Image: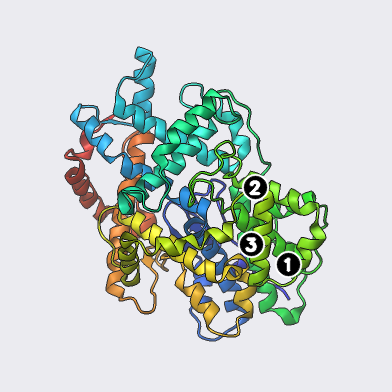
Amino acid sequence: MEFNNELITTSEYENLNFNSSIRGSYSTLQFVIRLHKDVRHHLDQDEITPEKLQAFSTFLHETIHWWQHIGSHFGFILNTSYPSFAASSFEHLKTLISKDLAYKSLVKFEENYFNEKGFCDIEELNIIVNNFYDLDYAKLFCLDNKNIKDIVKDKRLFLSIGHCFMIMWSNSMFTISETLDKDFNFIPKFNDWIGKFQELESKKIEGFYPDSNYRVSPLGIKAIFEGQAIFNQILYLKNAFAENKIIFKDFIDQGMLHGIYLEAFDLYLQIIKEDRPFFVDDALIGLFLLVCDISINPNNGFPLDIYDYENFINKNNPGLRFIKICEIISGQKGYYLERCKHLDKQSYIDLSKLLNKRLGCKCSYQTLEMFKTWANEESVKSLLKEEEKHIYEEINMPFRLFFAKYLRFQLDKFEQPEVFCWIGHHMSRAKDASIKHLFDKHRALFIDAEDGEVKPVIFDGIEEKNLLATFNKFYQHTMFYELILKWISEEGNFKFDYKWLLNERNEDAIPRIKQEFNRLFKIDIENIKIV
């Protein structure tokens, strides 16, 4: 069968900050799925046509990106790192204003101050700038471990990847604590980590002291995310068009499998010493998707407390996890491949237990049962009631929404892990409405409309007025998080470019944004001095 490339191709940027598309994309900083008008047109049709099935495969691909960032343990930490940083910087920024130190960018101001005096003795400025770089370096390292060659050149602000990881994890833990668990009834007591990490530095444990060597992976989280999304997409298409006897090479010839989309899969095949499969339903693909799933769901520090400090980096670095799992499989690949001939729940559970044990980690699947206990905490019960009606409290509202969606995902994944791991397979083979219901339940919350504006996705059983109110509050917070990040790191005047959200209404919104900025920080944004 000839696929229509106008309906099945996606475009993703290399830095995970997707904000452009050919037929579909997911933006990790704007939290929105974007679909080309042709894809949207076919999705809106009532009749099931070949074009609609292909269009849905693109929507499935982008929805998996939403799942990766809202539903995987690593993705949740990554997804919430900058919103958490912006929120935690708020009081420090107000203090700087009170000291008449309202400069933009703060990164440039701190650099100039340090170059002039040889030190920086402004506490709030130090905290903001150091945390910013720690988060940025942690993200860059996970995106591509080879970035360490450039990261280590910063002898002033970079301490170690171990320190950067600690800041990224504890940053999100702090926001969860402030939002839902100030007494640490269920989340890790991250304040206890500092002394342990200082010990690792003093003992010169690899990765935790300045000028350390680092274990690096030849691929990063980007390649794993793309591999997981595209191979679920081709499983869906293969099953949806089963009568056409589609083979693996067909997807290469159609231009779907190339570059970043094949990077993780080809490395996996190289490590386990296998050639590319002939058939799409080969167990090699099912096993690959399980490797991706386990790789992006570390639990050493979140959601569990740290149980292996010395391997905090290696056990949380998705790229290294991916390589190690492939190496484990290579020694007994016949067994693993046999178990992946049937992509069912028991196979998922059994292989997860075995691979995590051999990886030296607590089982990523068994960890999910813990979320039932979390859901019984009074603060979490209240949050889940907010999620049911889609009406959230104002304080830390985006984080409340993210955490609620994350928790719902874990609770459902515990019951049906095979569906989330191999969604392309199960979505196209569903004989009842339960799989579709599960997929619809965990759709992304925001999508672009035909005119380019971002709109809330409509969910059955939730009043549209609630969806719209949450949408407005969420993006009001998001715009201010972005302004804070610009204030800290972007040189030059503030740029109020929200056409990605508001389209033609962008100019009308700018006076309201400035007014709200003044209300929050008690300063006109024009009075922030440009460095």
What crowding class fits label 1: few (fewer than 14 Cα within 10 Å), some (14-19), or many (20 or more)?
A: many
| Camera-side residue of 195 and 149 | 195
Q: Residue at x 33, y 65 (%)?
A: 381
Verify CB contact (< 8 Å) between mark 2 and mark 1: no
Disc 3 and disc 1: Cα gap in Å?
A: 18 Å
Mark yes or no: residue 350 visible.
yes
Q: Mark 1 = which residue? A: 340
What crowding class fits label 2: few (fewer than 14 Cα within 10 Å), some (14-19), or many (20 or more)?
A: few
Q: Look at discs 3 and 1 and give the one toward the viewer.
A: 1
Is tag 2's residue or tag 1's residue first in the polypeptide sequence? 1
Is tag 2's residue or tag 3's residue first in the polypeptide sequence? 3
Mark 1 element type: loop
Q: x%, y% of residue 17?
A: 49, 49
Q: x%, y% of residue 1?
A: 73, 76
Q: x%, y% of residue 224?
A: 62, 53
Q: Residue at x 36, y 79 (%)?
A: 461
Q: Look at discs 2 and 3 and give the one toward the viewer.
A: 2
Q: x%, y% of residue 424?
A: 62, 70
Mark yes or no: residue 41 visible.
no
Q: Mark 2 = which residue? A: 360
